[in-house]
Image (spheres, rainbow, N blue to C red):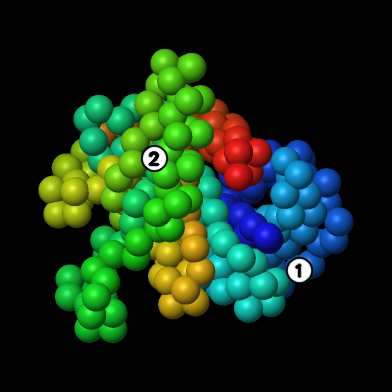
Amino acid sequence: MLWGIIGAMDDEIDLLRRKTIIKEEFVRYGCTFSSGTLEGKSVILVCCGIGKVNAAICADTLIQSFGVDRIVHVGVAGSLRPDLECLDVVVAVDAVYHDMEPGVLIDYFPHCDRFPCDPGLVSLASSVCSAITASQGRRTVTGHLVSGDQFINDRTTKERLHEQFQAACVEMEGAAVAHVAYVNQLPFLILRTISDSLRDGAILEYNHFKPLACEQSSRMVCALLDAS
Ligand code: ADE
């Protein structure tokens, strides 16, 4: 079983890379794909860069060139719910673009208006992450995730996204990874730690919490691999 693990930023993947016994490294499209063993499991790690297209390129490369069996997308996200605070964890049940014209997706995928994450991985991740966050006095929730090519800084837009999609969190890559995995019929999971809450001026919180949120996410991935 080969796990593809993908994050958008160096901070999101470097902590995992440091814990991995690296066997080989490959550079494709300017991204480094590191293969090795993490928590006793065979993995390929890649930092894809920010945004949906970068994420899609790397997800497809993980599948087509490296033959991964499943993909875990890991990183940080902005909260869209008043009860979700920084360093809480979201295990996505599905993902969709918030910046695509409504209805476009359904033209291509008549039975799918959001890309569903693998239910077995969601359930395992949810119990593993809940145990860790409970011991920290924080929360793990399962919920919808939305992605778009913008950093959402203001509360009004976050509230609109929550109303429109009933989503728990927003980020900039997950739905693209989900889309690629979906068309390849590959199981995938998205694990995100909240880096900015439902307040105005998200960027200030984000800058402060990003390193801690990346640590939290990498803790979750290690625990998930260990439990699987
Ligand atoms: N990633 C982390 N926080 C985010 C936000 N507020 N908007 C988009 N992507 C994010």
The label on residue 118 is none
Crowding at label 1, few (<14), some or many (≥20) Cα neighbours within 10 Å?
few
Q: Position of residue 70 (x, y in %)?
A: 57, 62
Q: Is residue 192 visible?
A: no
Distance of label 2 from label 1 (alpha carbons): 30 Å
**Left/right of residue 136 with respect to residue 109 in the rendered view:** right
Report which quarter residue 12 is drawn in: top right
**Is 218 or 42 nearer to us in this picture?**
42
Q: Residue most toward the right? A: 23
Which quadrant holds residue 99? bottom left
Amino acid beneath label 2: Val
Residue 226 in view (yes/no)? yes
Residue at mark 2: C-beta within 8 A of ligand 1: no
Q: Residue at label 2?
A: 90
Disc 1 marks which residue? 27
Q: Position of residue 5 (x, y in %)?
A: 61, 55
Residue 52 in the figure: left or right of residue 36: left
Task: State which quarter of the image contains the C terminus.
Answer: top right
Q: Residues within 10 Å of mark 2 (few under 14, many from 20)?
A: many
Q: Amino acid at mark 1?
A: Val
Residue at the spot 23% in from the left edge and 36% down from the top edge? 81
Q: Quadrant of the N terminus?
A: bottom right
Front: mark 2 or 1: 2
Q: Residue at x 37, y 49 (%)?
A: 92
Residue under the point 65% across and 39% down: 226
